[in-house]
Amino acid sequence: MRAIINDDMDPKNIMWDKGEPFVIDLECLGYSNPIASSVLQWAGTVNEKFNAERERKFVIHFGV
């Protein structure tokens, strides 16, 4: 599975205007597997606080 995704969806990279979100940092935009990306972001790679237990729970819960 491949999709266009942004692997850096940190809150600092989203600006809001009248309730509408705009992604402002697109340097990590590209084709990737959205499930694998979600697992890594949920586990804390974006904020540099990786937690293997969170990664394991995500994989078990969603069966990926």
Image: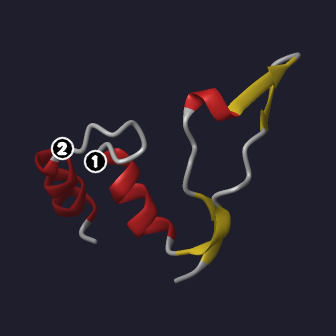
Residue sitting at x 79%, y 22%? 16
The spot of residue 61 in percent (x, y) is: 21, 56
Vertical side of 37 occupied by 51: above or below: above
Residue sitting at x 63%, y 58%? 28
Which mark identifies residue 6?
Answer: none
Q: Residue furthest top?
A: 18
The spot of residue 52 in percent (x, y) is: 14, 51
Left or right: residue 25 versus residue 38 is: right
Vertical side of 7 occupied by 46: above or below: above
Quarter of the rendering occupied by the C terminus: bottom left
Query: Mark 1 to mark 2: distance in Å?
Result: 5 Å
Q: Which residue type does callout 1 highlight?
A: Ala
The residue tagged with tag 1: helix, strand or loop? loop
Residue sitting at x 43%, y 67%? 35
Badge 2 is on which residue?
51
Q: Residue furthest right?
A: 18
Neighbor class of circle 1 (other Cα within 10 Å; few <14, some 14-19, many 20+) is many
Q: Residue furthest bottom?
A: 1
The answer to whether mark 1 and mark 2 are in CB contact below 8 A is yes
Left or right: residue 19 versus residue 49 is: right
Badge 1 is on which residue?
43
Left or right: residue 63 versus residue 3 is: left
Q: Which residue type does callout 2 highlight?
A: Asn
